[in-house]
Amino acid sequence: MKVKDKLKIIQGNIQEACEKSNRNPEEITVIAVTKYVTIDRAAEAVEAGVVHLGENRDEGLLAKQEVLRDKPIWHFIGSLQTRKVKNIINQVDYIHSLDRLSLAIEVNKRAQKQINCFVQVNVSGEESKQGLSYEEVTDFVMSLKDYEKIRICGLMTMAPLTANESMLRSCFRSLKELQCKIQNLKLENAPCTELSMGMSNDYMIAIEEGATMVRIGTALVGEEE
Ligand SMILES: *Cc1c(COP(=O)(O)O)cnc(C)c1O
């Protein structure tokens, strides 16, 4: 299926999720996760009107940027090794995977201008997942208040891979709750207005629970049906 047609389906689903939860679809940003697909397919997404692209590796990001240049707004969504920060930090608009102080130090050192960062939270506590635990997030954000290159624009999580809707909802709700806590700190560099949650399998539920950015790969740019 063409990206254009997949995008229409997704926009319809977003509309539906917004109606259910009394939200405005304009509050939701779709990030096309192009990590599995070719540069041509990513270009097709841009052509179809997708403005935000997400990649999880420095090589993939740089290869696509060479072709697509600065047309899209770029999101780095993968776990980020400290030594690779310098390769991508001034090439992207958002980082979704800030999860440790050593990484924050490197980002703050290498960024030429202030960069929007999401703190990645491992809400479900699964061993295989990156991110800070729920309990660690507030102290972490407070510890970054003097890092002038880092702007905590929001929180990001990956829900467990499950079809259990109540488990998914409770994961997304916890992230929303944590967002309120961070906002109450009223830190100048941590407005925390965004929630990056929801992927191909769970973005509608994530939107009902308050997502402002959904990261969609397979359902939007996947080349299989
Ligand atoms: C791959 C990936 C996605 C997109 O996954 P799909 O299930 O294909 O939509 C979203 N977020 C992160 C962090 C990813 O690594």
Image (cartoon, grey):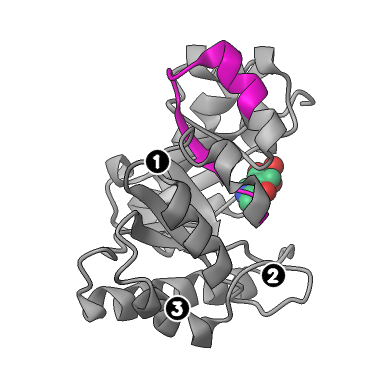
Q: Earlier in the sequence, mark 1 or mark 3?
A: 1
* Label 3: which secondary element: helix
Badge 3 amino acid: Phe
Instruction: Point out residue 93 in the picture as x, y percentages from the top left corner.
Output: 41, 38
Closer to the camera in the image, 81 or 178:
81
Q: Earlier in the sequence, mark 3 or mark 2?
A: 3
Give the residue drawn at x 61%, y 31%: 220
Q: Residue at x 20, y 66 (%)?
A: 188
Pointers 3 and 2 in contact (C-beta within 8 Å): no
Residue 73 at x, y percent in the picture: 42, 30
Q: Quadrant of the N terminus?
A: top right
- The magenta segment: 62-81
- The residue that mark 3 highlights is 140
Q: Is residue 178 found inside the magenta-colored segment of the image?
A: no
The crowd level at tag 2 (other Cα within 10 Å; few <14, some 14-19, many 20+) is few
Asked whether residue 39 is in view, the answer is yes
